[in-house]
Amino acid sequence: MDIFSISSAVHYSHTPPPFTLAGKHHHATTTTSAASLILASSSSQDFPQNPNPNSAGLRRPATQKPLKTSIPQQPTQLPENPLKKFVNFQNTPSATNSPPHDTLSNKLWLSSKLSPPPPPPPPPPPPPPPLQEIELQDEGFENSEENKKEVEFREKGKIFVGNLPLWIKKIEVADFFRQFGPIKNVILVKGHNDLERNLGFGFVIYSGSTAEKAAMKAVEFDGVEFRGRVLTVKLDDGNRIKGKYFDRAKWVEGKEDDAVEYRSKWHEEREGSRVDFRKVLESQPENWQAVVESFERIKKPSRKEFGLIVNYYARRGDMHRAREMFEKMRARGIEPTLHVYTNLILAYSVGRDMDEALSCVRKMRDEGIELSLVTYSIIVGGFAKTGNIEAAERWFKEAKEKITSLNGIIYGNIIYANCQTYNLNRAEELIREMEEEGIDAPIDIYHTMMDGYTMTQNEEKCLMVFDRLKECGFTPSVITYGCLINLYTKIGKVHKAMEISEAMKTAGIKHNLKTYSMLINGFIILKDWANAFSVFEDLVSDGLKPDVILYNNIVKAFCGMGNMDRAIRTVEEMKKERGRPTSRTFMPIIHSFARAGNNRRALDVFDMMRKSGCIPTVQTYNALILGLVEKRQMDKAVGILDEILLAGISPNEHTYTTIMHGYASLGDTGKAFEYFSKLKNEGLELDVYTYEALLKACCKSGRMQSALAVTKEMRAQNIPRNTFIYNILIDGWARRGDVWEAADLMQQMRQEGVQPDIHTYTSFVNACCKAGDMTRATKTIQEMEAHGVKANVKTYTSLIHGWARASLPEKALRCFDEMKRAGLKPDKAAFHCLMTSLLTRATVAEGYIYKGILKLCEEMVECGLTVDMGTAVHWSKCLRKIERSGGGITEAVQRTFPPDWNSHKTLTAISDVSNDDSDDDDDDDDSGFRDSDSDGEDVTDFNGKFRS
């Protein structure tokens, strides 16, 4: 930094400086002229008695002489003054030199359009005075600056306290000196080697407007005895700050050789350990042991090192260790700053403990530390992760009021909070607000919006955001393509997800574990096990190491196939690869064994889970109870509930809801209400799934008045009725054939804004068919198609059953053909319903019914469908009415009978039954159709609505 010495020499020397020094620093004239003058003058006065003639700085003459007579009148011999040229260059506007094109004003052109125009520039300064006047003014300025700094070296309200006991604490010193005024801080100087021991002196700093008066009063206590010692109390003379200032001035002038700083071995070791800690923190952040060991090697960590270690634990989500380091820092007498507090709040935010985060905020405000934009952003992001949208919006509003300009990070956090709560309209408003304020949206906000539209399954807007991302010049990353893959796997369009995967490979972007996991999970949902395992093989071939989530998906796939032994071997392979199974790894295995009725193997998996270090949780027991409930083994399910209580685990609302669903499937209303009372008495949360189980039990048993009472209690608990609730109620009235009540529920759905789905329409069509109102059933089908809801196999089966009850088999056949033309494959219930209808009406119908029966038999044989023994006996009774001695129809229909069908024994059994065939055939048909249809629907709904 010899430029300041050179500038001083050019100003005040009567002779030109040596050529070597002047030529050495021609390139260093980039600082402002005012700074050069001030630093040059101050550096010349800091060391006025420098005896070294070879010093880089030149002393000013001791007496002031008229400079006009001392300067020779030979301008041609005087070299050009670089400082004067620098001053003229900075202060004199040049008409020839045009400003460069990349000036700051050009860079902020967009901001200047969005904000009010700046005020006009000030008028140009007057031309600089002659060199002689500058030197005289500078000398006077130098003297005043020296006096000013002498005053500023002493801190007002600060006193020195000496001869303190070595064991004294800060709080005791503060209590003693607080009698003179409010204290801002107490500083006790610690030893280098023994950090717990004081050196016997320190400083007390008073605060407020009376700080200087309080310090003067405290000085009067000089010589007072305190804790067995005679205190030395003095006003701060500013020597410490003055010494630092002079040392810095020496270093700036290059005079450090005059006072060389000899660092002790302790200081060198401490500085080396601090550097090593930063290197480990940057190069090995995943190795927490190395980070902790390098921090512990620092003999006396400063506030910066404590802030770094708190930030490290915060990013790991270890809020307890972060708090421990924070308290250690305060115990050493280091007061936390905004940066340290922000790192601690980050730790609680990552750990999702926002109550402790807010307590840190209150502590900050008590200490007079204002929150920064980073702190507000962390708090908003923490509430976004916990799903507390009200708190996130409240803190975001406070940030807008306290901070003038926000950035894209805090906007991204509040947008993420709204996307997680499915409030996409508010998220779009925030994006518009951000763009109006001139804040460019980063690519993370695009990803957040795509993920939000994925959760709401809005394919159109998700693709719109993807296209906009590319238009803005962003390059799609693996996260971008992962959002699209997640979208298509959730809406069941796995083939489009595979197209995105191919486009991703074409763009040169490799899959990661998350994208592969999404594809595997998509195929598992479709029960396409072969493609799921194929994707897993691609993952291994790409050199990726499966993580716990991928292994859990593979275990789930094997359990879906029914190969639980292979799932257990997969868990063993995961252990060999040093993977750590979780409770979610064993839950599908336990559930599959329980559903298969193999309780012993399910309990063996429990023991295997304990040996793997996983403690069974209530979710694990819920999986076992669910399997038993689906197997209709309610006694064993209740026994597992008793084991949960013996293990010291409290059942949750899902446990009781699962058992209630089991009793509801059996139509046992009493037991369902019994466990509902237990759930309510234990203070657990009552949600829509709990009331759904109650309504299912009431409707299954035909107690519709009890179902209405349950809906009234739901209204009292402010629990809205969703589509599932309406489906259960409509199906209950459909079982009774009350089409008017079902139609009234459909009207209530529209008034409450609940959209009917395919199950709603199917139940209402079934109610119309039971009541014989086929006209309304046909209109319902047309309305359903107008709303974009396509009929499924159960909808067509209900129509076929309705036309059969109306004695119109030709329309039933026509409806069956329409179902096949729609691309639907008839199931066993559809064949059973239509065949029973045709066999019942064959004796009085025309010949086309015989052709329909033969065609149905051929299709059933091609599909490999066989009926049960009860259906075979019922159909054989109908065949005896059509063909007494047998014939082509009898032979064709008997091909669909069970393999153990014995005509002689069956005919004997039939002869024992009354030959007088009553008109209850239709009732038998109704019951058989209703049981097969409703039971299948119950199991499907139960699986879809269970939450583990």
Image (cartoon, rainbow, N blue to C red):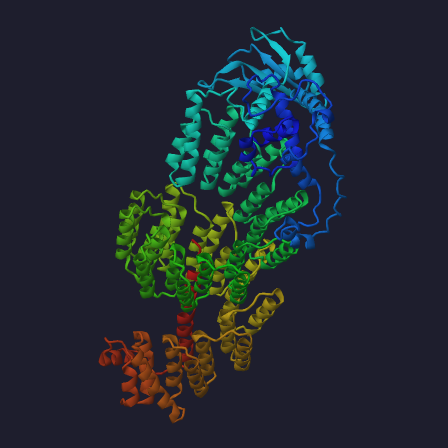
Residue 105, placed above or below residue 493? above
Query: Compared to 666, does 820 lie above or below?
Result: below
Q: Residue at x 68, y 9 (%)?
A: 220
487 sits left or right of 70 in the view: left
Is residue 668 found left or right of 901 in the rendered image? right
| Image location (x, y in percent) of residue 83 | 64, 35
Quarter that holds the N terminus: top right
The one nearer the camera, 203 or 547, is 203
Q: Is residue 525 visible?
A: yes
Position of residue 469 measured from the top left corner of the image (x, y, whole percent): 53, 61
- Residue 97 percent coordinates (x, y): 66, 49
**879 sits to left or right of 24:** left
Q: Is residue 156 above or below residue 234?
A: below
Pick whichever, 735 or 946, lies toward us. 946
**Relative to residue 224, is residue 91 depicted above or below?**
below
Q: In the image shown, does 119 or 424 lie closer to the viewer?
A: 119
Nearer to the camera, 571 or 922 = 571
Q: Could you say where residue 306 lies in the image, as x and y percent from the top left? A: 49, 31
Q: Quadrant of residue 419?
A: bottom right
Q: Residue at x 41, y 91 (%)?
A: 845
